[in-house]
Amino acid sequence: MTEWFQSLIGHGLGWFVATLILILMISLPLMLAVAMVIYGDRKIWAAMALRRGPNVVGPFGVLQSFADGLKVFLQEVIIPSAANKGLFLIAPIITFTVAQLAWAVIPFGKHMVLANINVGLLYILAISSIGVYGIIIAGWASNSKYPFYSAMRAAAQMVSYEVSIGFVLVTVVLWSGTFNLSGIVEAQRAHVFGIINGFGFNPLLFPMAVVFLISAMAETGRAPFDLTEAESELVAGYQTEYSSMVFALYWLGEYANVLLMCALNAVLFWGGWLPPIDWAPLYHIPGIVWLFIKVLAFFFVFSWVKATVPRYRYDQLMRLGWKIFLPLSLFWVFLVSGYLMITRYGV
Amino acid sequence: MIQLIAFYLFAVMVVGSAALTIFARNPVHSVLWLILAFFNAAGLMLLAGAEFIAMLLIIVYVGAVAVLFLFVVMMLDIDFAELRSGFARYAPLGVLLIVVLAAEMIFAVGAWSAGSLALSQRIAPTPDEIPNIQALGTLIYTRYLFIFEAAGLVLLVAMIGAIVLTHRARGGVRVQNVWQQNKRRPQDAVRNINQPVGQGVEL
């Protein structure tokens, strides 16, 4: 498409227009997916609690998220008089924007990636580390006690779990030999026994897939690690002072982040857009379908955990991050690099 | 063209936000401007073709160092009037620092462009087909392996030193024994009884 536009309206401008369209092609369906996923999350949660969940707007309540969106859009934005007005409004924009930024490097198919950059994985780490600012700034700018506590919790929690996520990613990078996400997906082709696609099926990498899944839950602040918005202690956490559309931006950003983590799980450990088995007929199904199936499966796991596991205590959360995941993933980096050294270089 | 625009955008933002870091009245705003400066510096690195350094700058400085920095500054109770009162007293020292820094920069640029160091010895940009990370990795882990490991050792010692200096064991603090908590089972804590009506429960 880029070439077509470039032939039409010149090199630079064509590239610009084509990229703009591609960005919209990712972010608009993403927002639609987020709306549907919020509905799905509520339905799954309701089903596990033997409730009906949203069932009024549209058939089976599928339009509930859109109704909610319309409602918050028409509401008044209330800015607390003691709040730091500029930062108060910038914070949700940061969260919302950053949640979409990382999707630029996710490969949806063999050549379906917006930015096929060499440092894709580092880019994702960088973007996800910026995400915490939306929460910290909100907590501080609200000038209220509970949001501030929540911001402190969020900062400590995300920094802690990013450390172990970093080491998990190192094991994946060691095995695939590249930071490029498309390259990582390609490296998983026929990975186990020459027929199964995906690092997660490799017994040496499977524990890291589990660590990554749990760390992803902590990183996105989902239950059971949703201490930043623990309603029994902190009212609504950092969102307490937010209302209407600015609140909805947090909501959308949060779910976009959850979807991103599901997609990362799929791309890094379960073969991304590759079918699970390296068998020719399965390749007739487009890669994007396989990716969607995997992302939705992981989203179901996220909802499932949210519906069943009670919230962690804060010291338990920190203990899990620093005393269990960090040594474990560090040891695994050592183990994987040792194994690769012996098998590939024979030392 | 677009590169030029991007360069001037990032450069102006770096300088502007660095200036605002100093001039902001609120320390939290100061740190936020500093973060913006880091971010735009990463953009400049990207333009220079050092994508690995750019990402590292964001991950390390924006993602970790600045978060902890912000953490501390938010918690502090700073009296601004008191901070500003020392301005005249510290001004000569500040001017001295500025002069030294400026002189050093002029010397460095002068020495660089005087050409006493042969052009061939300057680090050449990596060829296009080798990614940044690979080029850096080969250099660090083969040619400069021992220096690199020594640097790591220095950091390790610094880390241990920081922990030893700040850690103090307080006596008489109740801490949770996680192993004991996890070992606890319902039957250790709960007793099901079927007590007839009208009789008390023996505790």
Image (spheres, grey):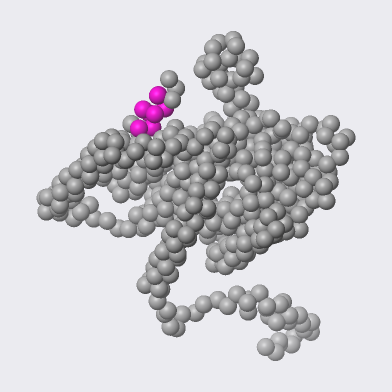
Q: Is residue A275 left or right of residue B202?
A: right
Q: Is residue A48 left or right of residue B118?
A: right
Q: Residue at x 52, y 43 (%)?
A: B135
Would you identify the image quadrant in which residue A336 lies?
bottom right
Q: Where is B190 relative to A147, above or below?
A: below
Is B8 magenta? The answer is yes
Closer-to-camera residue (A25/A226): A25
Q: Position of residue B119 (x, y in %)?
A: 36, 36
Q: Where is A28 relative to A244, above or below?
A: above
Q: Quadrant of the N terminus of chain A?
A: top right
Q: Position of residue B24 (x, y in %)?
A: 27, 43
Q: Please, which residue is most extreme toward the top here?
A: A8
Would you identify the image quadrant in which residue B22 lies?
top left
The segment highlighted magenta reads B4-11
Q: Quadrant of the C terminus of chain A?
A: bottom right
Residue B165 seen by the camera: yes
Closer-to-camera residue (A206/A244): A206
Q: Position of residue A204 (x, y in %)?
A: 73, 59
Residue A218 seen by the camera: no
Is A17 magenta? The answer is no
Q: Where is B93 relative to A294, above or below?
A: below
Closer-to-camera residue (B27/B135): B135
Would you identify the image quadrant in which residue B76 lies?
bottom left
Q: Is residue A4 left or right of residue A83?
A: right
Q: Please, which residue is most extreme toward the right here?
A: A281
Closer-to-camera residue (B13/B157): B157
Q: Residue at x 70, y 82 (%)?
A: B188
Q: Residue at x 44, y 37 (%)?
A: B124
Predominant SS along the magenta part: helix
Q: Residue at x 23, y 44 (%)?
A: B104
Q: How many marks?
A: 0
Q: Position of residue A101 (x, y in %)?
A: 55, 36
